[in-house]
Image: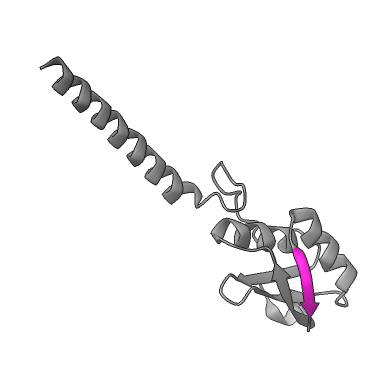
Amino acid sequence: MLSTYSILILLAAAVVLSVKSIIHRIRCGSSCCGAKDAPAKKVKVQDKNKSHYPNSCTLTIDGMHCGNCVRAVENALNSMDGVWAKVSLETKHAHVLSKQAVDRERFGKALADAGYTLLAME
C-alpha cells in the first residue's frame, strides 16, 4: 500500500513538472537561442509612413532558429535610427527600409551585437 502511494506521488510530481515545462515553452519559446526568460518586448517603429524610407534592402541573416531569434533581430534593426525592418524566420531574410543610405557595416555590427551574422545584403 505504501509503495502504491509512493508511485502515485512520483507520477504526480512528474506530471506537474511536465506541465510547468510545457507552459514555459509556450510563453517563452524554445531555448534554442539561449532564452530562458520571456522574450524581450518588441521595439516598435514610430514612423510607419513608408514614403519616409527612400532606401530598402534585403538582408540574409545566419543564426536564427526560433521566434525569439526573429524578435531579437527585429529589435536590433528597429533600434537603429531611421530603420524599419520585418524579419522572416522561414527565409532567414530581413526586409529593411531606411531613411539614410544603406550601410552594410552598420547593419552587420547591429546584428553581430545581437548575436547573429549578416551573410548577404541585396
Q: At 41% from the left edge and 41% from the top edge, which residue is drawn? A: 21
**Which residue is nearer to you in this view: 50 or 28?**
28
In depth, the one of 109 and 45 nearer the eye is 109
Residue 118 is one of the magenta-drawn residues: yes
- Residue at 50% x, 48% y is 28
Q: Which residues are magenta?
A: 117-121
Determine whether, in the image, residue 53 is placed left or right of residue 93: right
Residue 8 lies in what quarter of the image? top left
Specify the quadrant of the image occupied by residue 81: bottom right
**Residue sitting at 86 percent across and 74 percent down?**
100
- The quarter of the rendered structure image containing the N terminus is top left
Secondary structure mostly taken by the magenta-highlighted segment of the chain? strand
Q: Position of residue 24 (x, y in %)?
A: 44, 43
The residue that appears at 88% across and 77% down in the rendered structure is 101
User: In the image, 37: left or right of 96?
Assistant: left
Q: Is residue 100 magenta?
A: no
The C terminus: image quadrant = bottom right
